[in-house]
Image (cartoon, rainbow, N blue to C red):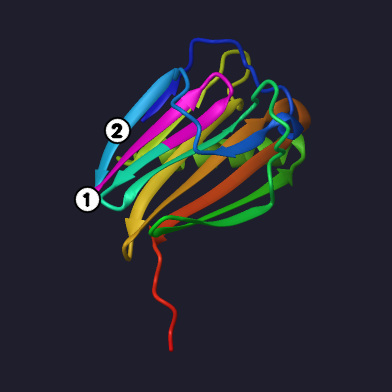
Amino acid sequence: MLTTLKTAYTDTRAADLAWALGREPLPALAVLDLQLSGATLQLRLLGASHQVLLEQDEGSCSETVACMPGSSTPLPLGVAKRLGEWEYEFAARVETLTQGQFAGRAQELLALVADHPNSLAGTFPGSPHAFTAMLAQRHEGQVRWRTWHAYPQEGQLVVTRSRVGVRMPAAL
């Protein structure tokens, strides 16, 4: 689902993004509720990027990547955590592109998510290439999602990848 967000563009730089696990739901500008083979997933576009809320029989998980006032946790390159019965993994990277490359990549990503049933994307006023997009799937017992946060003014695209799955017992 692709929507135009009716708000000011809050994130001004990729470097302003922070990551948090376990935050309460924040006010959202757009929400998509999904059922993925026993998992309830809520994709949330915020005025300051994204939040994912996951509920399964084994528990719940909340991931937030946003400009969070007072947060001192910068966006990590990678995180691996055990959450009760689950294993959670997060990875992020920043792509720096020329203006022409950025426009092409933005169009490509928005086309990828525009009509996908498990996606939510929002464009911000002021630039057709200022957007946040999210795409979720369930694969081999794991819930996975990818996000893209576009910063056309600095030619940067922040790409994240997350995975939550039931922890496998150690092999003997």
* Image coordinates for residue 38, horizontal then vertical, percent: 22, 50
Query: Mark 1 Cα within 10 Å, few/some/many (few <14, many 20+)?
Result: few
* Image coordinates for residue 143, horizontal then vertical, percent: 37, 53
Q: What residue sits 57% from the left and 13% below the top?
A: 125
Determine the secondary structure under disc 2. strand
| Secondary structure predominantly adopted by residues drawn in magenta | strand
Residue 91 is left or right of residue 172, and the answer is: right
Mark identifier at residue 38: 1
* Image coordinates for residue 151, horizontal then vertical, percent: 68, 30
Query: Mark 2 Cα within 10 Å, few/some/many (few <14, many 20+)?
Result: some
Magenta residues span 38-52
The amino acid type found where label 2 is placed reads Asp
* Image coordinates for residue 119, horizontal then vertical, percent: 38, 38
Q: What residue sits 68% from the left and 32% below the top?
A: 17
Q: Is residue 131 above or below residue 143?
A: above
Nearer-N-terminus badge (2/1): 2
- Write down the residue under mark 2: 33
Q: What residue sits 33% from the left and 41% below the top?
A: 118
Residue 143 is left or right of residue 27, and the answer is: left
The amino acid type found where label 1 is placed reads Gly
Residue 46 falls within the magenta-colored stretch: yes
Nearer the observer: mark 2 or 1; the answer is 1
Q: Is residue 123 above or below residue 155?
A: above
